[in-house]
Amino acid sequence: MSRVAVPPDGGRNGRGGAAPAVAAAHVPPRAPVRRAASGVAVVGTVAVLLAGAGAAAGAVAGDPVVEGATVNGGRDVIVGITHDVRFSVTVTGADDSGLSFADVDLKGPHGGFYTTDAFCETATACTTVFTVNAHLAPGSDDPVDLSNAQAGRWSVDALVDAGDGDSAFAPGVGTFGLKRAARLTVNASPEPVAKGARITVTGKLVRANWDTYRYAGYAGRAVQLQFRPKNSDTYTPVATAKTSATGALRTTVKAVKDGYWRWNFAGTGTTGPAKAAGDYVDVRP
């Protein structure tokens, strides 16, 4: 079921436009309607549950218990500028009658907000699917889901229903990183090179700009130069360089043996990691 969510700030997201629509796996209609346009969940006459500090703090005997949430299999969600990114959120818990339904909200920096719901696949697990993007649909000038300011750490709130009609709300039951995609290039020259001579290794680090829908240089970041000998599967660190104002990289190393050179960026709190494909250099006696 897809729905448009309005965050608590009155319906504005970090870009200043309407809150993003959320694409999710289709589920059959369900009564009663459990979430108002304001993004506040309501379950019959027990809406007061939402004012509590979560299932563990406010639960009474027989209430379902929310134990945790796993986002994207425990990996960061990395978003570029050209494709939708789909990922799952699995909420786990327990109840003597089994879990039956879950509403899941994702909340991020600067008003980032997504919501969707799903029936539970087992008595202890409920998996919802989210779709996010940072690109304009073809022929559209509508605001997209994400802005640069919304990259970073996000939290998960979950409201679960049990088979016997009881419900429990758990704010902040999980967290995950929603990050801008990065790319790296490499070029090692000259090729071939005499043993003992100097090799110049260049490259460029760029990352997705969710505001302009382009990739742009990532300045002032430390990037590791790595080497893999011919007939080996293992890269080892050789040097570290810092990107220029345009994201450019450059360093020189001594040619010792045939092998592959690459740049490796570990990522940051807002940007995903990146590795360049190895560039082979033939070292001759």
Image (tube, grey):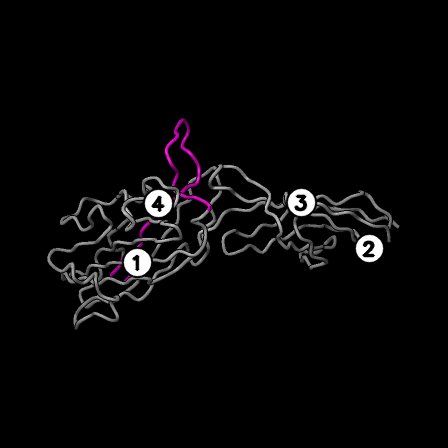
Between the residue at mark 2 and the residue at mark 1, the CA separation in whole angstroms equals: 54 Å
Residue 247, image x, y percentages = 63, 45
Residue found at x 33% / y 64%: 68
Residue range of the region highlighted in magenta in the rendering: 122-148
- 44 in magenta: no
Looking at the rendered structure, the kind of residue marked 1 is Asp
Residue 94 seen in this snapshot: no
Looking at the rendered structure, which numbered label has been put on residue 157? Answer: 1
- Above or below — where is 211 with respect to 70? above
Residue under label 2: 256
Q: Are marks 3 and 4 in contact (CB under 8 Å)?
A: no
- 137 in magenta: yes
Residue under label 4: 13
Q: Pick whichever of labels 4 and 1 is earlier in the sequence.
A: 4
Looking at the rendered structure, which numbered label has been put on residue 248? Answer: 3
Which-is-in-front pick, marks 4 and 2? 4
Looking at the rendered structure, the kind of residue marked 2 is Val
Q: Quadrant of the N terminus?
A: top left
Q: Nearer the viewer, residue 5 or 131?
A: 5
Residue found at x 39% / y 42%: 15
- Above or below — where is 205 with respect to 269? above
